[in-house]
Image (cartoon, rainbow, N blue to C red):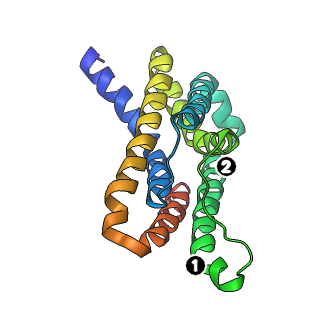
Amino acid sequence: MDFLSTIIMINLVGIGANLDNSSIGMAYGIEKVHFPHRVNFIVNVIGFISALIGTYAGKSLSQITPYQFGAISSCIVLSSLGCFILYSNYIHPYTTQKKELKLQRPNLRMGIYLGLGLSISNAFSGLGVGLADMANMWWIALSITVWGYLLIWFGNLFGAKIIVRRLGKHSSFVAGLLLIIIGIKQIY
């Protein structure tokens, strides 16, 4: 494989492994919640570590853990966040007047949870690449990390500035539904 093909492949793997990250950023942006850079950093450090572990694990991990385990785990985390958004904006206001639930600005703990949830796909992307070409494992892990950071950031900006203006009061519904769809997409 020549240099240009290698660069293209590394970036495509990084983007493909992190499309769900842009949805996370958009969901927070739609709710007008800023996703802090330090939390984004934590999420993607966890993603880097998991991608590196995935590339190292290679064939042995694929024999121990079926691919569906990672997909189902990722589905549960993302769908749960989507259900929380739908519940807090559409069901909770009609069931009680005592306490308002709202998607909070993510803190370091939430960054760790999101990092773990999103890193499952990074680990399995790294696993796939590790089976094919171990020489690029550091570049693959770095690509997954950089694209993960950028896609959360761009998703948050895009969700906050463009989607909220277009959808108005329905933006919370779209955010929750988007996360549920992305979660289900992890399985299929």
Distance (Cα) linking label 2 and label 1: 31 Å
Left or right of 10? Residue 59 is: right
Q: Amino acid at mark 1?
A: Tyr
At 56% from the left and 25% from the top, the residue drawn is 55
Residue 174 position by quadrant: bottom left
At 43% from the left and 75% from the top, the residue drawn is 169
Q: Position of residue 168 (x, y in %)?
A: 38, 72
Q: Position of residue 76 (x, y in %)?
A: 65, 58
Left or right of 159? Residue 182 is: right
Q: Image height check: is 89 above or below 78?
A: below
Q: Amino acid at mark 2?
A: Phe
Q: Secondary structure at mark 2?
A: helix
Q: Nearer the viewer, mark 2 or mark 1?
A: 1
Number of numbered discs on residues: 2
Q: What residue is shown with label 1?
A: 90
Few, some or many C-alpha atoms within 10 Å of disc 2 (few <14, some 14-19, many ≥20)? few
Residue 60 position by quadrant: top right
At 47% from the left and 57% from the top, the residue drawn is 32
- Observer able to see residue 2: no
Q: Earlier in the sequence, mark 2 or mark 1?
A: 2
Q: Nearer the viewer, residue 32 or 91?
A: 32
Q: Quadrant of the N terminus?
A: top left
Q: What residue is shown with label 2?
A: 69
Q: Secondary structure at mark 1?
A: helix
